[in-house]
Amino acid sequence: MTTTSGPLATRRLILQGAASVALLGLGNLPFAPAHAAANDKYPEEAFKQKNEADAIKALYGRNAEPSNKVKLDAPEIAENGGVVPVSVTTTLDKVSSISFFVTENPFALAASYKIAEGTIPGVANRLKMAKTTKLVAIVEADGKLYSATKEVKVTVGGCGG
Amino acid sequence: MASSIRVRATSNGDITEVQALIQHPMDTGLVKDPKGEVIPAHYIQQLTFECNGKDVFVADWGTAVSKDPYVKFSFKGAKKGDDLKISWTDNKGASDTTTAKIA
């Protein structure tokens, strides 16, 4: 019996370790979704959401409707998923924010821009894409959300080393 | 040390066009180095453009923004010679600030 207590004790220790890790994981769960789009704080919770719907909910707290007034420009085929040039312009009035969601990425929300009064509602930037994905741009205008969607084929993913 | 931020702000009548390029690794925390160890997440979270005491453009970024990020936008209400202040902070608490003259 004494010979088997060694490995057993080790196994128990490992299990305890796993349990405490699980507890730590729980501690990081979002407590309350912060609708940070309206203020200046960094929307930490929205950036932690894995899928697009949850990220939109965490960022804005409501749904977007597709609109042809939002123009999303992205390449149809991106050779390098690490650097994909993406831009949005819109003819909508009273735009207060523009956000980009890459649905197949580990975390859907890529970037969110606050547009002040007097700033032209449009932005160009470069994003990473893990694989071929749907790209969604959301424009917040006069309190409503409008979206545009585009499929981007990625030949080399942007997450590998 | 040279600034991590390179900015070009050009005035064209009423509209000022701003292009900014920042040197930053933008590590996702999901990539492993050649030894198989995870490179911890290190990315810019917030980037602010301020002109005449007003935030004209604020970017909130996640890890999906490309390494050495680039951003371009335009705004109204500034003229040639005005100062444009650009600052960023990352998830490790580091930050940098620079001021550019609108040309």
Image (cartoon, coloured by chain):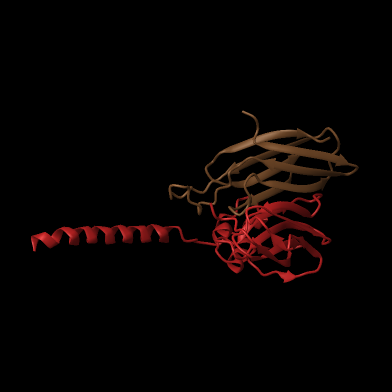
Chain colours: A red, B brown
Horizontal and vertical percent position of residue B90: 57, 44
Residue sitting nearer the eye, B50 or A109:
A109
How many numbered tags mark residues here? 0
Q: Is residue A65 above or below residue A42?
A: below
Which image quarter holds the N terminus of chain B?
Answer: top right
| Residue A10 or residue A145, whichever sits in front | A10
Q: Residue furthest left?
A: A1
Q: Where is residue A121 in the image (x, y as percent from the top left)?
A: 79, 55
Residue A136 in view, yes or no: yes
In the rendered structure, the answer to whether residue B27 lies left or right of residue A141 reads: left
Q: Is residue A8 above or below residue B99?
A: below
Taking B35 as reference, is B8 above or below it?
above
Above or below for A30 versus B56: below
> Which quadrant does the C terminus of chain B fall into?
top right
Q: Which residue is drawn at 37% across and 61% down?
A: A22
Pinpoint residue B83: horizontal percent, then vertical percent.
77, 34
Is there any visible trace of residue B54 in the rendered image? no
Please tell me which residue lies in front, B56 or B73.
Answer: B73
The image quadrant that residue B3 belongs to is: top right
Image point (46%, 50%), residue name = B38
- Residue at figure coordinates x 65%, y 35% from the top left: B97
Q: Residue furthest right?
A: B13
> Residue A66 location in percent, x, y?
74, 71
